[in-house]
Amino acid sequence: MEKFETHEYDVIIIGAGGAGLRAAIEASNKGCSTAIVCKSLLGKAHTVMAEGGVAAAMGNMEGEDNWKTHFCDTIRGGKFMNNWRMAELHAKEAPDRIRELEQWGAVFDRTPEGKINQRPFGGHTHKRLCHVGDRTGLELIRTLQDKGVHSGIDVYMECTVSQLLKDGEKVSGALAYWRETGRFVVFKAKAIIICTGGLGRAYKITSNSWECTGDGIGLAYEAGAELLDAEFVQFHPTGMVWPPGVQGILVTEAVRGEGGILRNSEGFRIMEKYDPERMELSTRDVVAKAIYHEVKGGRGSEHGGMYLDISHRPAEYIKKKLPSMYMQFMELADVDITKGPMEVGPTTHYTMGGIRVEPETAATRVPGLYAGGEAAAGMHGANRLGGNSLSDLLVFGRRAGLSAAEHAQGLSAAPTVDAGQIEDAANSALEPFNSKEGDDPYAIHRDLQDNMQDYVGIMRSEDDLKKGIDGLEQIKQRLKTVRTDGSRPFNPGWHLALELRAMVVISEAIARGALQRKESRGAHTRLDYPETDAETYGKINSIAAKSGKDMDVSTAPLPQMPDELKKLLEDK
């Protein structure tokens, strides 16, 4: 181990988004030596892309809002596939996490009375999203980052974790490498928290930035954790469709929350047909599928999407409430949204599936390993409501940090880091440099994205899913001999070759889970099984786990909700 740069901490968090920062703050506040390891820069997290708001039943706009209503909305939006305990904890604790942010310096938009302003969003009964224009995620990250750096947390930026290390069954650390130099670094830890976000880069059209390659989900899977409900991938209904260079970039749901209207090429307001009660504020799965059907029916916009129009609102109102959207369309598409419509279409946005964790502790089945934020599963069921992701990462980021700290402080000695295991992990990471005849990682990535977009996308069927799985098997074989040219410093091809390992694992879990679930529910739609099967599939979760060198996909009973919470859903 002497030849490797080595650092030792009580708690290490992989990922520097909202969940990672909140977890780190909590662990540090509990007296643990704490570090964040992130492959990008501190503050360069996908949390920033959450523009519309953070959901919490504060009742500032409509006094009758409360945690019970928020809980019911979340369960119904998730098509009853949520872990009920996570949804309950989230609804109860979200308001406190918002007040905490405010105490730490977050600046929210205000009502005339001085309260935090809240806007409506799809699937929410009340105006519930606390916001800062359409830059809410940016303000959240700014606040957590400022609090974090003043909490004594060490940060290792542009440092990618390639493998978790174990002492028997429990985690003992991680092997990482500096992206700038390619040199390896060993982190020893009593507890590790995965907060690496989503997996959108496995798809061709996505709102996700380059970091979202599912690294942490893949790391946890390889270390022995289970993946839960991977088939539930959310396709946000409104991403940019033109010009091609910006296809998939998010158009916040706040546009619809502030009165935006979706029309087809014939000028018809499409949500009158698909959800006349909630209209544009229907849940994301319903709106995305509505756009899909309209385009397939030949009623799409000029470039194959729908028209989203908010120009009926005053120009100054739009610029005040949606400043980022105004600038985004002016600069990227030469469209003035105060004068005309935007062209939008579904884009891969969020995974409801991910690492299986315990609700109260955020613990995986691997001792010492925890997960929070988008990388963890269970909270959102089959479909996430807008705004719930930011309050999710605050609530469960805190819980993960607290539990990891308690675990670390309960150990009498640090786990052992085996030198041979480190050598094996380093050799595995360097394999792409030793391959001479294989494909380059960029070609494999393009084929993976095409395969997932074409066969495991917004609408699925048995034939397509089997084709997708066959395609993934071929990609897995090609990945064994993936070739990286050049040297280790500043080598994005090498980085991608390693990221592909996680993307292929996640893609297989999505495809096999989707094939197993013979129903349509939330974000998972089967053309050959269009109905929701409450009696069979409404009572089971999908589980993916490593079995030798293969993936085993099975089911587990959905946790049973207590009668008092069932009654809430019946009454509201």
Image (spheres, rainbow, N blue to C red):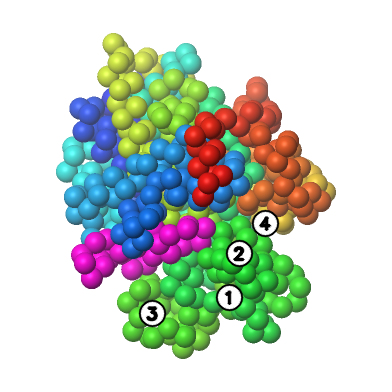
Label 4 – label 3 distance at C-alpha: 31 Å
Residue 215 place in picture, x, y as percent: 49, 41
Q: Which residues are magenta?
A: 108-137
Residue 219 shows in the view? no
Considering depth in this image, is 282 or 357 the residue closer to the camera? Answer: 282
Q: Given contact means CB atoms under 8 Å apart, are the residues at marks 1 and 3 in contact?
A: no
Residue ID at (29%, 50%): 98
Assess whether residue 134 is covered by the magenta stretch: yes
* Mark found first going from the N terminus, 4 or 2: 2
Residue ID at (23%, 56%): 106
Q: Which residue is mark 4?
A: 458
Q: Element type at marker 1?
A: strand
Residue 33 place in picture, x, y as percent: 23, 28
Q: Element type at marker 4?
A: loop
Label 3 – label 2 distance at C-alpha: 22 Å
Considering depth in this image, is 13 or 127 the residue closer to the camera? Answer: 127
Q: Of the residues shown, which amino acid type is indicated by label 1?
A: Leu
